[in-house]
Image (cartoon, rainbow, N blue to C red):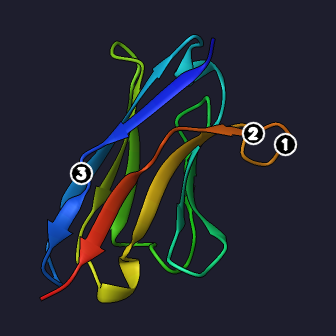
Amino acid sequence: EVQLVESGGGLVQPGGSLRLSCAASGFTASSVYMCWVRQAPGKGLEWLSTIFTDGSTTYADSVKGRFTISRDNAKNTLYLQLNSLKTEDTAMYYCAKDFFRPNWQRGQGTQVTVSS
């Protein structure tokens, strides 16, 4: 059974940093592409970043240069480093398997709140 468990969210001031983690089980995360997405209150899902099987990465313009996706193959864990956070980054953050396919899967999410 595929499971994704996100953690690391919290309350942070503008300009601050957080590192989100996503522990994967039931499959090998390095054998598929994995994404981070978010959903702000009252808004739709927003794709943020993808890490491919070869380790290459892509980012949405809204987070490029501020967020970094990475993966620890030994721990089967995905990460998202969030730097220079803005109030508009406030959202529930999810890691996602097969995000661009109909039956994509996500975890329960971790809340990030950016506020002074």
Contact? badges 2 and 1 (CB < 8 Å)? yes
Relative horizontal placement of residue 20, taking residue 48 as reference (left or right):
left
Instruction: Determine the residue positioned at 27% across, 72% down.
Output: 113
Compared to 20, does 42 lie above or below?
below
Binning the other alpha carbons within 10 Å of mark 3 as few (below 14), some (14 to 19) or many (20 upward) gives: some
Instruction: Determine the residue positioned at 40% across, 32% down.
Output: 71
Compared to 66, does 32 lie above or below?
above
The residue carrying mark 2 is 104
Q: CA distance from mark 2 to mark 1?
A: 6 Å
The residue carrying mark 3 is 19
Secondary structure beneath label 1: loop
Secondary structure beneath label 2: loop
Binning the other alpha carbons within 10 Å of mark 2 as few (below 14), some (14 to 19) or many (20 upward) gives: few
Name the amino acid type tagged 1. Arg
**Picture mark count:** 3
The residue carrying mark 1 is 101
Compared to 108, does 59 lie above or below?
below
Contact? badges 3 and 1 (CB < 8 Å)? no
Compared to 38, does 108 lie above or below?
above
User: Reading the chain from its start, which is encountered first: label 3 or label 2?
Assistant: 3
Say the numbered circle drawn on residue 88. Answer: none
**Of circles 3 and 2, which is in front?**
2
User: Reading the chain from its start, which is encountered first: label 3 or label 1?
Assistant: 3
Binning the other alpha carbons within 10 Å of mark 1 as few (below 14), some (14 to 19) or many (20 upward) gives: few
Q: CA distance from mark 3 to mark 1?
A: 26 Å
Residue 112 picture location, percent across and down = 31, 65
